[in-house]
Image (tube, rainbow, N blue to C red):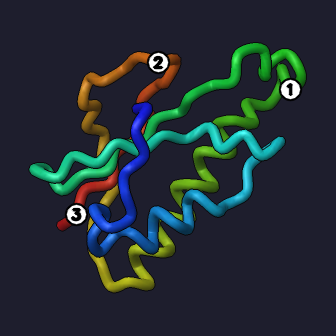
Amino acid sequence: MKTPLARDLAGNYASALDCVRSGPSASNRQPWRILRQSAQRAFHFHLKRTPGYDKFTARIDIQRVDMGIAMCHFELAVRELGLTGRWVVANPGLEGGNAEYILTWVES
């Protein structure tokens, strides 16, 4: 989860990923990480938490709200591009680097 996907390798999804990258988040932390699995035509969304961030917002998990914003931007962008897919639970088991699996978007 350390190497950004080059725009020219993102194919039809380059604009959708740009929408996620440029989207807002609390404190401009952009805690999302998206892993592309081309064989399964899947995008796995992970949350990379900022250590200690929860002590400022103990009652509300702001970084989860950030994930929802990122996922919404992705969904709206792929729809606008005419791409079809759906959200599924399909954890690729690639936890690590302080990132937790959230959800997967699979092309249909």
- Position of residue 2 measured from the top left corner of the image (x, y, whole percent): 43, 32
**Would residue 34 appear left or right of 54 to someone viewing this image?**
left
Residue 73 sits above or below residue 67 on the image: below
Q: Mark 3 = which residue?
A: 107
- Position of residue 86 measured from the top left corner of the image (x, y, whole percent): 30, 61
Q: Mark 2 = which residue?
A: 97
Dividing the image into 4 quarters, which one contains the C terminus? bottom left
Residue at the spot 45% in from the left edge and 74% down from the top edge: 15
User: Dividing the picture into quarters, in which one does residue 105 lie?
Assistant: bottom left
If you read the primary sequence from the N terminus, does the residue marked by circle 2 or circle 1 appear first? 1
Say what amino acid the circle numbered 1 marks.
Answer: Thr
From the viewer's side, name the closer residue of 23 and 108.
23
Which residue is the extreme one toward the right? 56
Residue at the spot 44% in from the left edge and 84% down from the top edge: 80
Question: Is the residue under label 1 in contact with that under label 2 (CB below 8 Å)?
Answer: no
Counting other residues with Cα less than 10 Å from the Cα at mark 2, is it few (<14), some (14-19), or many (20 or more)? few
- Position of residue 37 measured from the top left corner of the image (x, y, whole percent): 21, 46
Residue 80 sits above or below residue 84 on the image: below
Cα distance, mark 3 to mark 2?
A: 26 Å
Say what amino acid the circle numbered 2 marks.
Answer: Gly
Question: Is the residue under label 1 in contact with that under label 3 (CB below 8 Å)?
Answer: no
Dividing the image into 4 quarters, which one contains the N terminus? top left
Q: Mark 1 = which residue?
A: 57
Q: Circle 3 sits in a helix, a strand or a loop, which is it?
A: strand
Q: Circle 2 sits in a helix, a strand or a loop, which is it?
A: loop
